[in-house]
Image (cartoon, rainbow, N blue to C red):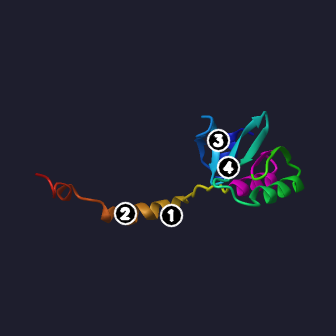
Amino acid sequence: MQLEEFAETYSLRVRRSRHDGTDNIIGKHGEIYEHSEGKLAVMVLPDPPRRGLWVRSRAKFLALGMAVGQNGDQEGAATFDPTHQEQAKAAIHAIRAKRMRKLSPERKANLLIAGQGTRLKRRHMAQNAV
């Protein structure tokens, strides 16, 4: 599973990393990136450092069978199988990735209908024209 498929499955947004310019899933406390063929990695980098976040995340990662590749005092990285649901959820939770909202077709249609009466009319747009 590639990063884009993983992001679509879990309703996450893929963005460019500010560190190295690659496509990553960026969260509040770290990133998820492609590590190797069929493997993803999670890098927990809280900024500013949060005491115990990496320690708790690492303990959960090891309990789920994820391999810890880098282990620092307050930051680290682990690889995981993106098809393993529990590992994926733990990685997403550790970096506090924000999920994208998905509107149902019914809700989207209702919002469009409700917004029809509030749109600006052509005559109102030239109100402050000179």
- Residue 31 located left or right of residue 102: right
CB within 8 Å, label 4 to label 1: no
Three-letter amino acid code at the position of disc 4 = Gly
At mark 3, the secondary structure is strand
Disc number lying in front (4 or 2): 4
Residue appearing at x 79%, y 33% in the figure: 37
The tag earlier along the polypeptide, 3 or 2, is 3
Q: Residue at x 64, y 46 (%)?
A: 25
Residue 83 horizontal/vertical position (percent): 79, 46
Q: Secondary structure at mark 2?
A: helix
**Foreground disc of the pair 4, 1:** 4
First-in-chain label (4 vs 1): 4
Image disc number at residue 115: 2
Q: Earlier in the sequence, mark 1 or mark 2?
A: 1
**Distance (Cα) linking label 3 and label 4:** 10 Å
Q: CA distance from mark 3 to mark 2?
A: 35 Å
**Residue 36 quadrant:** top right
Residue marked by disc 3: 24
Q: Residue at x 46, y 60 (%)?
A: 109
In the image, residue 70 above or below residue 47:
above
Q: Which residues are magenta?
A: 75-95
Q: Establish if 39 lies above or below 103.
A: above
The residue at the point 15 percent across, 57 percent down is 128
Which residue does the numbered mark 1 point to in the structure image?
107
Q: Amino acid at mark 3?
A: Asn
Precedes in sequence: disc 4 or disc 2: 4
- Magenta stretch encompasses residue 27: no
Label 3 near label 1: C-beta < 8 Å? no
Residue bearing the label numbered 4 = 30
Q: Quadrant of the N terminus?
A: top right
